[in-house]
Image (cartoon, coloured by chain):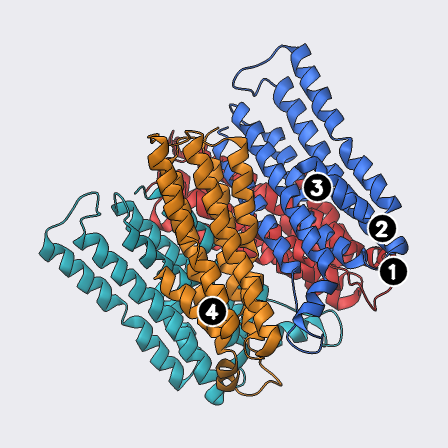
Chain colours: A orange, B blue, C red, D cyan
Amino acid sequence: MDKSRAEAFSDGVLAVATTLLALDLRVEATGRGTLVHQLSQSWPSFVAYVVSFFVIGVIWVNHHAMFALIDRVDRVLLFQNLVLLMFVVTVPFMTSTLADFIPEGGSNARWAVLLYGISNIGMALGFTVMLSRIIHQGLLVNPVPPDVGNRAIRRFGLGTIAYPVATTLGLLWPPLMLIAIGVQNS
Amino acid sequence: MDKSRAEAFSDGVLAVATTLLALDLRVEATGRGTLVHQLSQSWPSFVAYVVSFFVIGVIWVNHHAMFALIDRVDRVLLFQNLVLLMFVVTVPFMTSTLADFIPEGGSNARWAVLLYGISNIGMALGFTVMLSRIIHQGLLVNPVPPDVGNRAIRRFGLGTIAYPVATTLGLLWPPLMLIAIGVQNS
Amino acid sequence: MDKSRAEAFSDGVLAVATTLLALDLRVEATGRGTLVHQLSQSWPSFVAYVVSFFVIGVIWVNHHAMFALIDRVDRVLLFQNLVLLMFVVTVPFMTSTLADFIPEGGSNARWAVLLYGISNIGMALGFTVMLSRIIHQGLLVNPVPPDVGNRAIRRFGLGTIAYPVATTLGLLWPPLMLIAIGVQNS
Amino acid sequence: MDKSRAEAFSDGVLAVATTLLALDLRVEATGRGTLVHQLSQSWPSFVAYVVSFFVIGVIWVNHHAMFALIDRVDRVLLFQNLVLLMFVVTVPFMTSTLADFIPEGGSNARWAVLLYGISNIGMALGFTVMLSRIIHQGLLVNPVPPDVGNRAIRRFGLGTIAYPVATTLGLLWPPLMLIAIGVQNS
């Protein structure tokens, strides 16, 4: 099967998820104090917006780079892609939950960190599974020998350890997670 | 008429409908109890999200597969495609209604099951009608003889019986519907 | 300039506007009565959803047909396209306003009809202006002689009279507008 | 890397951001007075909708024109594009804040003007940075000599001064900002 519609659908989902992030930026004209006050109260929303924008943005850049290497898709890969996108689409919810509960601290904030971590780990695993299928099923434009392929998968898989690490750091002190993911994406 | 814009528009609608599903995932920072409590209360939303994501995802995979076989579109097919998409776009509403009313049980839950069933049956019928037009109007890249075409339509049409069955199961016990549709899509 | 991105952007806007229509379908799990009661109360939302879905759907089909005839776009046409899309994007708001105020009747319902009419007339005029530019600037793949072009524009422009007529009918009895627009699109 | 997916993703983000602008158009069926009264109260929302629609529309036209000149993208340009889109996606929030606080006047309105200005200045700077990378890295279809390129960047950079000027005017009298940006985009 041709890969172009899989790219178009993924671009659509990633673009909408990215844009929905901004729905969590919100102030109200009445009954909540001055605009400056509200903005200073909702700084976690702004930080979370920027971090999550680049989380999804980096997913898009990687998705782009991965699909540039492949020649065609099969039905299994399309479903793996759906699983990846299913995690991506939860990012706005996870982001808004994180931004809402970080100021509270305590176990609420730690649960919010865990949820955000699940999205990120799900996306990282989703990518590794897709990469593995692409390499082992010879869907690449230029197929690679098995050992080269396996090495690429291991290297990529290792990179995904950053997300559980960031999540663990976040369990110690929630804002650390945003910093860790921000650093990693830059 | 060229088929590429019909694909692009459909990809857009499917991508947005998919992403809007996540708008029903929602917790609140204040006055609703701890985050864990809220998450445990809203498990139907999470299950419904995953099931509906794959319902629309499978629609997309099938739409992709169907359009890969056709050579061009005509005005009638474009309108049939709009009818299909009109049902797809109701999925987020049907999903959120189902998730909200399943915990209540009783006749409310059964009505929610019926609504969700209508969306699913509408999409299945929409596909069958489009397949029939594509085969009978010779819009295929490789036209097939009438008997082969009719057999394909009957086989596909039979597959769509799964949706009324899942709906009927759901009327007996609502969660059965999500399980039945989940099994069928996997 | 190449026309493909103008098509992609328009497809995106039309797809999102179409999907946002469904945000107005809404019931609530608590404090508003049974699901059946709520559904029966909000029938105008469902009718308005279907009508508006096909209003935007027909816009898309016509946009598709128009762009299929043109060879390239110029800067002025891109801006005219933006004006058309600006009216399209108001359709979800106009639709939800219409659905909310029709049950009230009286001058509120008539104002809602007028607003909905403005969107529709704006789109019809937007199309006529674009068609005129396309024909007079020779942006067509197969340019036509001036008199043929002018006849096409007049014929199309006459068709757009249906919208003010539907709006006027709506001012007499609001549901008539939805019926008139529904008939015209079918 | 091929530029087509960067265009598709950008088109998606711009289309969604454009359409989300209309979510701020809102009236309520009960308890807020007649429809005419509500519409006359929310004129800033309508003006802000039109202005912001063309702000994003012009971004899209310029993005289109810029990408039409380039031959390929590199990873840095993709990230610069993400930064540009990150500012674009804040426009619906900034617009709705501006529309909500302009009627209040005072320091709230001035802060809203400042926020809106930041979005606009961020987009203008984002464009200048991208143009500079495209010219200096020879990503153009037809590379230009350094002095011609530098002149183009300076000329474009100078044009972006309009945004801080519009913001400053807005700090004096908020509606002036919308007029200044409206004039500049026409």
Q: Can you give x and y, in whole percent of width and height, for residue D68 in the image?
A: 29, 45
Kindly identify which numbered label has been placed on residue B111: 2
Q: Can you give x and y, in whole percent of width and height, for residue B111 in the image?
A: 85, 50
Q: Secondary structure at mark 4?
A: helix
Q: Secondary structure at mark 1?
A: loop
Task: Provide the chain ID for the residue under circle 4.
Answer: A
Give the Cα distance between marks 1 and 3. Answer: 27 Å
CA neighbours of label 2 inside 10 A, class few (<14), some (14 to 19), many (20+): many
* D90 lies left or right of B185: left
- For badge 2, the amino acid type reads Trp
Q: Secondary structure at mark 2?
A: helix
User: Based on the displayed image, in which of its 4 quarters is residue A142 positioned?
Assistant: top left
* A93 lies left or right of C35: left
Q: Can you give x and y, in whole percent of width and height, for residue B29 in the image?
A: 64, 75
Residue at the spot 23% in from the left edge and 62% down from the top edge = D156
Q: Which residue is mark 1?
A: C34
Task: Provide the chain ID for the residue under circle 2.
Answer: B
- For badge 3, the amino acid type reads Gly
Residue at the spot 35% in from the left edge and 41% down from the top edge = A151
* B2 lies left or right of B135: left
Task: Provide the chain ID for the residue under circle 3.
Answer: B
